[in-house]
Amino acid sequence: MLSRRSSARFAMSALAACAISLTLVPAAQAHTATVPAAVTASYRAPGDVTLTDGDFGTVEVGETGTVTLTLTNNGTVLVGFDGLPLNLPPGVTRTGGTCDLDTAFDAGDSCTIELTWTPTTEGPFTGQVSLTVDEDGVVYDVTAQVTGNATTTTPPTTPPCPHTYY
């Protein structure tokens, strides 16, 4: 009896249902035979890369608040960022950190993204930071929420000076 072991690799999306059948065609016979195949499939759902949320705290209108987010690859594969920019809410800019979003990100690594926020109006602020990740061919967005509260300081009013005229 001739025995041959073969394997095949398939890419599956997160929404795909998969059914596999194996058809063997013996070279010496003119017909085909479908043989049940033992299939082992493993699928790792995306989401191994995480980005922490951040709070700018209370910031005076026109002043600048800073927050540092941490990007972590909790998975076992190298990931890339597809050369896409970090998407930031209005009024927020990237000002530093240790992440180089133009290179691959090794499994187990983490880095920081420093952001600043300069509010223009008084009140609470909530925004979303997002980054597109390519995790071994599975592309998804990693998001974080940033918050803050903008205030204005009203100068104290001084009572009018009493004037005495003679």
Image (tube, rainbow, N blue to C red):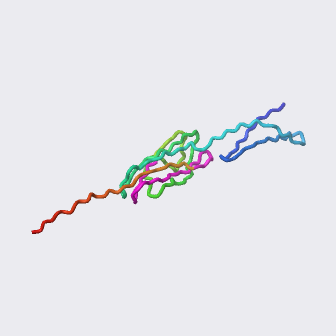
Extreme residue toward the bottom, this view = 166
Q: Which quadrant would the C terminus be assigned to in this image?
A: bottom left
| Helix, strand or loop: magenta stretch | strand
> Taking 122 as reference, is 67 above or below it?
above
Q: Which quadrant would the N terminus be assigned to in this image?
A: top right
Residue in front for this viewpoint, 104 or 127? 127
Residue in front for this viewpoint, 125 or 30? 125
Is 139 one of the magenta-colored residues? yes
Q: Is residue 56 left or right of residue 33?
A: left
Q: Could you tell me which residue is drawn at 49 percent across and 49 percent down?
A: 145
Q: Could you tell me which residue is drawn at 31 percent across and 58 percent down?
A: 154
Residue in front for this viewpoint, 53 or 113? 53
Image coordinates of residue 159 in percent, x first then y, are: 22, 60
Label tally: 0
> Taking 8 as reference, is 83 above or below it?
below
Read off the magenta span. Answer: 113-140
Image coordinates of residue 119 in percent, x first then y, are: 40, 57
> Taking 157 as reference, is 102 above or below it?
above
Extreme residue toward the top, this view = 1
Q: Could you tell me which residue is drawn at 62 percent across and 42 percent down?
A: 45
Q: Could you tell me which residue is drawn at 37 percent across and 53 percent down?
A: 59
Is 52 one of the magenta-colored residues? no
Extreme residue toward the left, this view = 166
> Taking 82 as reference, is 4 above or below it?
above
Q: Quadrant of residue 25?
A: top right
Q: Is residue 6 left or right of residue 56?
A: right
Image coordinates of residue 70 in percent, x first then y, are: 47, 44
Residue in front for this viewpoint, 162 or 35? 162
Q: Quadrant of residue 18?
A: top right
Image coordinates of residue 110 in percent, x first then y, are: 49, 42
